[in-house]
Amino acid sequence: MSENNWNLEPSLESVAQVQIKPQYELFINGKWQAPLAATYFATVNPADEKHLAHIAQANAADVDLAVKAARAAYDNVWSQLSGAARGKYLFRIARLMQEKARELAVLETLDGGKPIRESRDIDIPLACNHFFYYAGWADKLQEAFPGQQMEALGVAGQITPWNFPLLMLAWKVAPALACGNTVVLKPAETTSLTALKFAEICQEAGLPAGVVNIVTGYGDTGAALVAHPNVDKIAFTGSTAVGKQIQKACIGTPKKVTLELGGKSANIILEDAPIDQAVEGIINSIFFNQGHVCCAGSRLFVQESIAEQVIAKLKFRLQSIYVGNPLDKNTDIGAINSKKQLETIEEYLSIGLAEGAEIYQPDCTLPSPGFYCKPTIFTDVAQSARIAQEEIFGPVLTIQTFRTMEEVVQKANNSPYGLAAGVWTANGARIFGLSSQLQAGVVWANTYNKFDPASPFGGYKESGFGREGGRHGLSAYLQFKN
Amino acid sequence: MEILKTYKLYIGGQFPRTESGRTYPVLAADGSHVANACLASRKDVRNAVQAARKAQASWAGKSAFNRSQIAYRIAEMLEARKVQFIEELQLMGLDKQSAEEEVMMSIDRCVYYAGWADKYQALISSVNPVASSHFNFSSPEAMGVVGIVACQQTALIGLISQILPVIIGGNTVVVIANTNQPLCAITFAEVLATSDIPGGVVNILTGEVGELLPTLAGHMDVNALSLAPISSELSVSAQEAAVDNLKRVRIYTEPLYVKSAQGLSYISDFQEIKTTWHPIEQIAGGAGGY
């Protein structure tokens, strides 16, 4: 295949309406408060490595202040409000987010490196919709769980990842507030800016002080939140290793825990699948958001009879994937979120080669400076290979083949993870036959990487427990009394 | 001369002795020696988990209606042997009336969960109205193999209150019985063996909780734990071991031997929710529904 440097005319999204302050404080009790230790860290744009802002680094004492504010707001204000009144605040927040949608999208792209097309069309609308959706549940909790007595948990400590910063905030904050809890949220250190913008939106919405508190910082800030004795609930999205530490830390405490962790999801293409749609589905399953997706379809299983055809089409399709400036509307794959993550991905590329897999990357020029990785597929991958077992969290696909349904079910389930799976076939009976045997919390049949506030999301096995989204997502933030 | 009964373990539908060859004396309330029970070992736990895993897929694959009938059959078999259970409970110190009440409640509980087997799905499922042209629904699935530490205060009703809601949902179980009162548990295994429940769906071990639980809680092929009240030391170490493969752990602090200790939540505690998406073709310009 020919060298493919796409000399597309850049179509850059304007950054004019985004105001980034030089320095951000902690958002505690409705006010911006300087961190007690007066320490700050820098956040950079991964697309060009340019400095964006300094961000307060919360220590345990700051976290304590935030938890106290959340507790006071819970006791004195939020738990006294009717569900309908809580719902009105959430509706108001949803509307303000919609009004600032473009600003939020550009900010998300600047801070995290994801293509503007994705932040504009997926992350931000879904985040707004999530608030809108849960706003409507706030006064219908009794109808959601007929015959059961329930109450809010109290103060929810929430820790969100860097791959979908505002969307994951919405997944956590919206149901927590709808169910009557107050929150202390710790965003990922590389992507704090949209959470801080969200704090401004809470102020603008007139949300009572202390109902939402945002403490920025690194893992130790999150650990302080998890360890705080006055937190009633921990909701975490991130790696399985950290999720296990959190679960251990909460043993013997009354804290309720939900974990949304890693994955190594199987995407299965059967010989009777609509091939061209399936190839597009594969592209979307692994290269969406640079592959920084916990439910990415990172293990592709193709039925042997069509493997050659699918792989050829996939390689051809990779030639027209545009890796570039995330602000460019032509861009398919933006910047890797951080230098550290780029190093992790590159290490896995070497591991794959050392394990004897065959690598394929399209010819394309990567921007510089910035953190970028070519879309990569590995063929001749053994089931036991580390690249087929471990979560890479980047644009790297492993391809394996199979002959029978029994074989692919066994291979797909042979993973400690169980977050998602994809099935591509024109045979309806086979969809249900396969999907009921796959150990995964979400199964996409003839589609992939679709999300919706009404749709419960969460894993089996070591991909975590609890569901976010839909009616099922409410129970993560309620205490039921028998 | 009276023929004494040998109490053995219940693994994979068989009644083996413990591979360790050990027993411990079971004492009546008055301190007299009534029988010897198997002192199960860690190896017995692993054998039981293997049997439970082997049985799980086909048990979950049976129709819910079929699981309902089998659970009802357990109640029928329990009813037929109720005199024996009443005698065993009296040996353990219950007066005749309390023993009768416990057996009646146990039979009722089996009937109660038999009725649930094909109904809870309708109550905890949903069709989700996503904002794109997809059909999207969420429905429960069994977690898999569940380890149970049975109620240590009662010999029969606690055990049944923990086993029934878990198995009617398609899970298979490995149960550590009440250490000091293991007779009813093994007699219940005999009920199971003569009902239509496939071998391996329920496996029952007698022995020391402190010896068996760490192996069960740390076993990488166990998906979840159901813990009746036990010492906080044992409970904490089991929860820590459970983190290795993120077992779902349910800790029951309420008494399981009362009338109210039953309900949908005891079933849904051991169900995963799976959400499935599929595109909806738009025919003749019609908009996607759900």
Image (cartoon, rainbow, N blue to C red):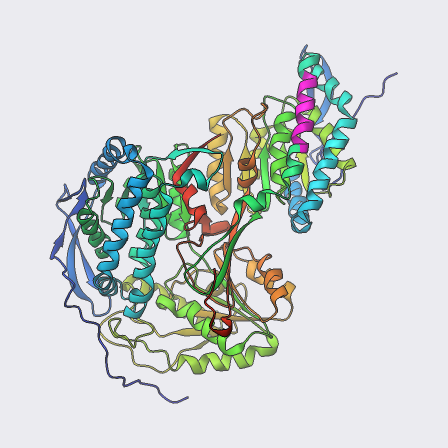
Q: Residue furthest right?
A: B1
Frontmost residue, A203 versus A388? A203
Please report the residue visible at 29 percent of the width from the left and 60 percent of the height from the top: A124
Image x and y of residue A416, in percent = 51, 54
Residue A155 vs residue A49, the one in the foreground: A155
- Do we see residue A347 in this rendering? yes
Q: Quadrant of the N terminus of chain A?
A: bottom left
Magenta stretch, main secondary structure, is: helix
Q: Residue at x 74, y 20 (%)?
A: B35
Asked if residue A226 can be seen in this view, the reply is no
Give the answer, above or below, for where B100 lies relative to B208.
above
Q: Magenta stretch: residue A411 in it?
A: no
Please identify the quarter of the rendering in which residue A3 is found. bottom left
Q: Judge whether A234 appears above or below B129 on screen.
A: above
Q: Position of residue B207 (x, y in %)?
A: 64, 28
Image-quadrant location for residue A269? bottom right
Q: Nearer the viewer, residue B203 or A18?
A: A18
Placement of A423 over or under B122, stated as above or below = below
Is residue A323 shown left or right of residue A52? right
A306 left or right of A448?
A: right
Q: Which residues are magenta?
A: B99-111
Q: Nearer the viewer, residue A155 or A296?
A: A155
- Indicate the position of residue A461 as horizontal and vertical percent values: 50, 50
User: Is residue B106 magenta-colored?
Assistant: yes
Position of A300 relative to A321 (above/below): above
Most extreme residue toward the bottom is A2
A304 to the left or right of A473: right
